[in-house]
Amino acid sequence: MYHYLEHQKGSKTNEDPILYDNFMQRIENGDKIEANDWMPAEYRDTLIKLISMHGISEIMGALPEKEWVPKAPSLERKLAIMAKVQDEMGHGQLLLRVTEDLMKPYGRNRQHLMEDLLSGRLKFHNVFHMPTKTWADAGMVGWLVDGAAIISQTNMLDASYGPYQRALQRICKEEVFHAQHGESIIMALAEGTEDQRKILQDSLNRWWPSLLMFFGPASAETTGSSKQEITIKYNIRKSTNEELRQAFLDKYMPRVFSLGLTVPDETMHYDDVQEKWIYQQPDWNEFKLIIQNKGPRSKARLKVREIAYSNNSWVREALAVAGGDRP
Amino acid sequence: MSEQDFYQEFEVFSRKNPRSGLMHQFSLLAPNEEMAMILAQENFMRREEVMDIWVVPSSSIRHMTDEEREALTQRIDNKNYRTTKAYGYLRKKWQDKEQGMLDEQEIMSWKEVKKNRG
């Protein structure tokens, strides 16, 4: 899974100009920055914000999917969706580890991230605030939500920060399995009975605004300067929010239509002259509310996270003691 | 106990098969090395081919600084005398004598020697 980039105020750089120029030279040469290397504070802070949100979204993203483990329609589907849920938790672990190293100079660690998540300071991706109502939604998350995630994550495979880039190589390889897992559920429904096709279309209609929101607003006009520019400046990612959304539509719209599905937007079409998809903007005010934990399932999912953490504290304690006995 | 004291950082290395070198996979947090071993398998070996895993406390590893890594790229670049590159001209010489070159591929194929010849 992955996230749009939020807009934030542009931060000023009051770094040593020689170190800064040397740093910029390195990333322009395609060199990778490692955890203990010198880096501008703006670079560190941007990475912390980006990767902590990415990591925590992987973990929060497993919650709507795990609801479908007991309800999966066959043993094979159950095993596959369990494997996917475990992958997402694994991705979360990788990304939190990357964030922890970046936060070290600030004396912050994983516990602080979890506290920030529960207090609402650390946001998670808009799509994971939404309910999954039917099995088709489980398929839709695997197919189009993960599809959108793959578009934004592959855009950072050459990121200038070495540890993040290495985590992404691993994550994107596993996303291939997730993409095909989602396609398999969708394909079965699309080629199924009338009822199955109906829940599939209903699911796409429900998810459509969230999918458009996934990449974040196109411009920072409403919210000040944009973090997308900072991440592009530092060679963390290559493309803007809108370029990524267009790339997503390029890859997935033909597939959506080939299954006989429609999207709930009559204006949606590809403009040959402008060479881009024309679509109706989702309600960005609603988007802002969702990521402030005011979405339909925000509170409930945070509660699950909190309960899981406190209920499992005895397991952590027991394992620490058991392992400690070994000479 | 705070998580700061509870967890240690471990680096995870694994070997795909007996011929391959140990490869760094990633790092993780665990309360001790036994848990680190379990988490290494869960986090990094769900699909991968693997026959051996090492976990090492990150604090035991002496990393290079960025200056030291930079220095590695500044090493003298002409090392032909240490490689077979300097001897490439022999291929043509042997060809003229209707003989093959004893290159890496050829020499590495000498594992098997004809048997039952005394």
Image: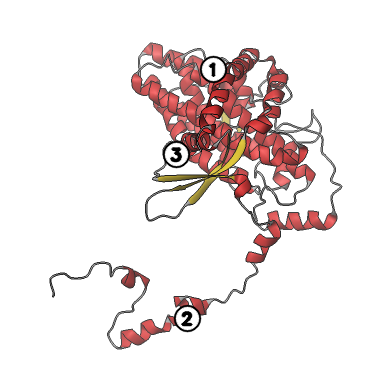
In the image, taking residue A134 as reference, residue A293 lies left or right, namely right
From the image, tell me which residue sits under label 3.
B45
Q: Residue at x 54, y 19 (%)?
A: A64
Inter-mark Cα distance, 2 to 1: 66 Å
User: What crowding class fits label 1: few (fewer than 14 Cα within 10 Å), some (14-19), or many (20 or more)?
Assistant: some
User: What crowding class fits label 3: few (fewer than 14 Cα within 10 Å), some (14-19), or many (20 or more)?
Assistant: some
In the image, taking residue B105 as reference, residue A313 lies left or right, namely right
On the question of residue A105 being in view, the answer is yes
Q: Position of residue B32 (x, y in %)?
A: 56, 35
Dots 3, 2 in contact, CB < 8 A: no
**Depicted A38 relative to depicted A264: above or below:** below
Q: Residue at x 42, y 29 (%)?
A: A181
Inter-mark Cα distance, 3 to 2: 42 Å
Q: Position of residue B11 (x, y in %)?
A: 56, 44
From the image, tell me which residue sits under label 1.
A205
Q: Chain of mark 1?
A: A
Q: Which residue type does callout 3 highlight?
A: Met
Q: Earlier in the sequence, mark 3 or mark 2?
A: 3
Inter-mark Cα distance, 1 to 3: 38 Å
